[in-house]
Amino acid sequence: MTALTHHLSLVRRAWIEDRATRRDRRIPLETAFLPAALEVIERPVSPTARITAWLLLGGMAASGLWLTLGHVDIVATAEGRTIPADSVKLVQSVSGGLVRRIWVHDGDVVKRGQPLVDLDPTLSSADEAQARQALLTAEIDVARNAAIVDGLSGGRGVFVAPPGTPADVLDTQRRLVAAQLGSARAADAGLAAARRSALADAAGAGDQMRALDANRPLMERQVKAIETLAARGYASGLRVLDMQRQRHSEMGSRDVAAQQRTRGLSEAQRFGEELNHSRETARQTALGDLAKAQSDAMQRRQDLAKASQQSRMQRLVAPVDGTVQQLAIHTVGGVVEPVRALMVVVPDGKLTVEAKLLNRDAGFVHAGQPVALKLEAYPFTRFGTVPGRIVSVSRDAVQDEKGPSYYMARIAMDQRTVTADGRQMVLTPGLAVTADIRTGRRRLLDYMLDPVSRDVSEAARER
């Protein structure tokens, strides 16, 4: 406590003496005419130079620290333009034709499926009607052949007409089915009757054989009895010969009956085989006709689908929600050539930027990097920049006919409006854009020394 009091008293005494010295110090005018040695004593050196030196040293130290610790962004610049994220949709006519009606004008906002242009449907409608009639005819053939197959397979053979069949055609087809089935059944009936007749002949011959076989033992006993009587002299030889002749006749009759039975069975088998073959042939023919008719009907369905599609395509509709631009037809009754571009529809929704990257920058740009977009229509000094990010970079360079090759970069925009005079201005496709892509950061010191390093590395060498 005593030491602190002593130091405080010393400080107070020094301050009092300094104040007294300042009061006694002469004014500059009084010392201006003194000798130099006395002037220095009476008038100390001004501290301004010392303060300036310290300020300069401090500034240099701060600048060195800032250059060492400070960083700047490395920016790659690319020129491009805004495009719809879904790409512009081209409206074309596949087959061409005459313009019947134009529903829209340049700049009209349309919804998906909204009509744009109607072409004359006369030819396409005629083709569709012809294809529809050809399909109906093919389906009638299928139904008729199906009924015939059903009838030949043991079914009722009912003709089921497809929808839209005229009444007179229905009656004709039913009579045709009945006639074909009747013809096939008549042929089968003839063969079946011939088989039954052959079986009946064989059965009659069999009955005759059985009767002769049953009478044979009696005939043998009669012949033996006559021969015994003749040997004893009780019967004439003529009687014996007559009995033997009768026995031989019955044996011949049996052989004939056996042959007739065999022939009858053979003919019955042949007629049965012919009947089966006739039925199978008729069924196979009907199945072949059915398969051919079904194939033809399938082809006719495809023709109708194509004709219907062609007819529907006579009305061109908007593929997406968007705005009509570049309308190329304005005359009702004019001729539209196939595959000619009639207009484009710029889709609503998000915008993206398609920018051209120079070769020297392409290696440092990749997906996900932030981008500041400067719109030529809205100077960034007044309206600011639009933030975005890199979506993709092409893997191969595109050769420009009028300049160096470049890589295509696609940039997604985080917003589609800019604020102008307190209003939100909606950005549209086709705006020129300068994209500043931040590819990294660099120290200020390295940036300042880069020219020196480059000059040093390129100096003191010969070609």
Image (tube, rainbow, N blue to C red):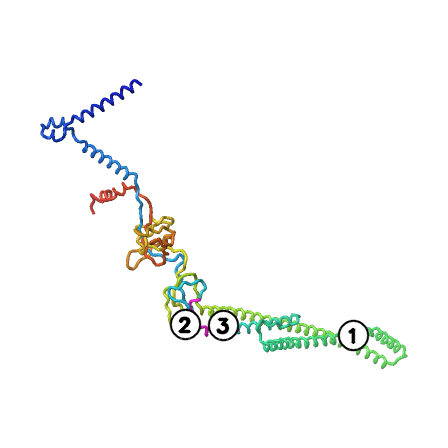
Q: Position of residue 317 (x, y in %)?
A: 44, 66
Q: Nearer the viewer, residue 8 or 372?
A: 8
Please state which of residues 349 and 4 is positioned toward the viewer in this rendering. 4
Per the image, label 2 sits on a secondary structure element best described as strand
Label 1 and label 3: CA atoms lie apart by 72 Å
Question: Residue under circle 2?
Answer: 99
Where is residue 337? Give x, y as percent: 39, 70
Camera-near label (3 vs 2) is: 2
Mark 1 or 2 closer to N-term? 2
Say whether residue 394 is visible: no
Between disc 1 and disc 3, the foreground one is 3
Determine whether the residue tagged by mark 1 lies in a helix, strand or loop.
helix
**The one of 280 and 147 positioned closer to us in this rendering:** 147
* Residue at 35% over, 53% down: 422
How far apart in space, not on screen, are marks 3 and 2 (Cα)?
A: 20 Å
Q: Left or right: where does residue 442 sit relative to residue 87?
A: left
Residue with the mark numbered 3: 128
Is residue 417 among what the camera can see? Answer: yes
* Numbered mark located on residue 284 in the image: none
Pinpoint residue 99: horizontal percent, then vertical percent.
41, 72
Q: Which residue is mark 1?
A: 207
Q: Amino acid at mark 3?
A: Glu
Q: Earlier in the sequence, mark 1 or mark 3?
A: 3
Dominant SS in magenta: helix
As drawn, the residue found furthest toward the top would be 2
**Mark 3: secondary structure:** helix
Q: Which residues are magenta?
A: 115-132
